[in-house]
């Protein structure tokens, strides 16, 4: 046997369970080392805002009066989010960090099971092994890393929205509860409210009504608990962009962020921003209706998550976890496509886009995003969102080719 034949035989030899365990352990160690020594760590900054706000509130202070010492950053979420975070008043800082890590870990596991799990089953892969590798790739994504190291809530909100997608795909009695997750997510943070529009657009008025009722009910509860804070939020704090930082900061990877960097130091044109938003909404409506007609509800949910990132005035890098369902569906499309150029093209993009989203490349222009290089490189993540928005493959309408909306156990 030649050396080449020996090498090929080695590569084709089935990997044992022990070999897979060693491989996962080695990769997990590499990911952990990268995340703790190379990647940016945000020192739980946003969790510090939440923690400080709650303790300030419990000391008879006002929620939206609190600012992180030495900064202009304060609590920017609706009052219901503060109500949900009240348990932090009972624990010390280290416990708050540990509890947040556990919640984010649980949310990540749920997201992977509901998005990657169906792909693993269709491909016939070993579940624990495939999901472990997918989880490590997931952990490398900068939006995920930032969500964890900032102590953010994005993964929890994504899990709530995907829970409704799961209920809708299940149908029957389960679908009666659809809308609760979206309603809670919208009451905690305004961006997920765009999914109520998705429910209306796709002919799910009952779920849309449930989501609206839950969001309004949660907001009403917060108004009853903290009436002054609610008045301040809806009349003042919501409109004060200084509390969230500069719109031109390179971390803002929305349509508004791109315009702010292009027009900096001047105010970006509101007419240009509004025109872009209208175009995005029209494209979204057309593509979602097309995906719904084809029975591709997962595609519609993924497109709506991308839309939320693009039209929000502020989409920090950690908000881009909403791209994860689209990235999974892109990989799924490549795996479903027969061998040939289209399959290779789709799988190449399915590997390349997460790689770029793990690279922190936009920070190369954190101090100066001017010029053509700043325009292209400083908006890299927004270009990825825009490309997925316009080019994410949607399924055909044939019954055997349909995929449920992020389904099943």
Image: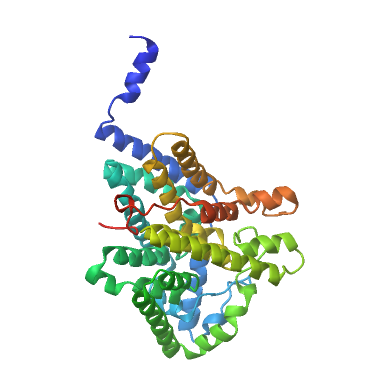
Residue at image position (28%, 30%) is: 15
Q: Is residue 115 positioned above or below 16 on the image?
A: below
Across and down, in percent, residue 70 comes to: 63, 70
Query: In this view of the protein, which residue sits in the foreground, 66 or 258?
Result: 258
Residue at image position (38%, 60%) is: 297
Q: Is residue 325 left or right of residue 237?
A: left
Tell me which corner region of the image, top left, top right, bottom left or bottom right, holds residue 179. Answer: bottom left
Q: Is residue 295 positioned above or below 193 on the image?
A: above
Q: Is residue 311 positioned above or below 115 on the image?
A: below
Looking at the image, which residue sits at the far top?
A: 1
Residue at image position (31%, 51%) is: 118
Across and down, in percent, residue 95 comes to: 39, 65
Across and down, in percent, residue 12 comes to: 32, 24
Query: In this view of the protein, which residue sits in the foreground, 198 or 20?
Result: 198
Query: In this view of the protein, which residue sits in the foreground, 243 or 184?
Result: 184
Across and down, in percent, residue 338 comes to: 38, 37
Looking at the image, which residue sits at the far left?
A: 173
């Amino acid at each position: 046997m030649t050396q080449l034949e020996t090498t090929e035989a080695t590569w084709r030899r089935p990997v044992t369970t022990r070999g897979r365990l060693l491989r996962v352990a080695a990769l997990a160690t590499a990911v952990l080392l990268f995340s703790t020594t190379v990647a940016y760590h945000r020192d739980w900054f946003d969790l510090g805002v939440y923690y400080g706000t709650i303790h300030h509130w419990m000391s008879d202070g006002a929620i939206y009066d609190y600012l992180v010492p030495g900064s202009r950053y304060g609590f920017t979420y609706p009052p219901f989010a503060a109500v949900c975070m009240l348990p932090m008043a009972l624990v010390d800082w280290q416990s708050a960090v540990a509890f947040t890590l556990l919640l984010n870990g649980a949310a990540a596991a749920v997201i992977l099971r509901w998005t990657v799990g169906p792909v693993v089953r269709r491909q016939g892969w070993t579940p624990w092994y495939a999901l472990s590798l997918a989880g490590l790739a997931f952990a490398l994504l900068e939006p995920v890393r930032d969500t964890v190291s900032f102590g953010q809530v994005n993964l929890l909100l994504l899990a709530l929205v995907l829970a409704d997608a799961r209920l809708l795909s299940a149908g029957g009695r389960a679908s009666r509860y659809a809308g609760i997750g979206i309603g809670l997510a919208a009451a905690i943070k305004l961006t997920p409210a765009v999914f109520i529009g998705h429910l209306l657009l796709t002919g799910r008025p009952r779920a849309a009504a449930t989501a609206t009722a839950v969001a309004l009910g949660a907001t009403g509860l917060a108004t009853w608990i903290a009436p002054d804070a609610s008045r301040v939020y809806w009349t003042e704090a919501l409109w004060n962009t200084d509390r969230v930082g500069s719109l031109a900061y390179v971390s803002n990877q929305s349509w508004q962020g791109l315009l702010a960097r292009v027009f900096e130091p001047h105010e970006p044109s509101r007419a240009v921003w509004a025109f872009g938003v209208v175009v995005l909404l029209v494209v979204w409506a057309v593509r979602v209706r097309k995906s719904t007609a084809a029975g591709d509800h997962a595609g519609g949910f993924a497109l709506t998550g991308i839309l939320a990132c693009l039209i929000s005035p502020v989409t920090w890098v950690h908000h881009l976890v909403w791209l994860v369902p689209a990235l999974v569906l892109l990989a799924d499309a490549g795996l479903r496509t027969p061998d040939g150029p289209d399959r290779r093209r789709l799988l190449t993009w399915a590997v390349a886009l997460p790689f770029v989203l793990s690279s922190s490349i936009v920070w190369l222009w954190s101090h100066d995003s001017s010029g053509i290089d700043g325009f292209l490189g400083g908006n890299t993540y927004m270009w990825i969102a825009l490309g997925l928005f316009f080019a994410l493959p949607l399924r055909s309408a044939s019954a055997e080719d349909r995929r449920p909306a992020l389904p099943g156990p």
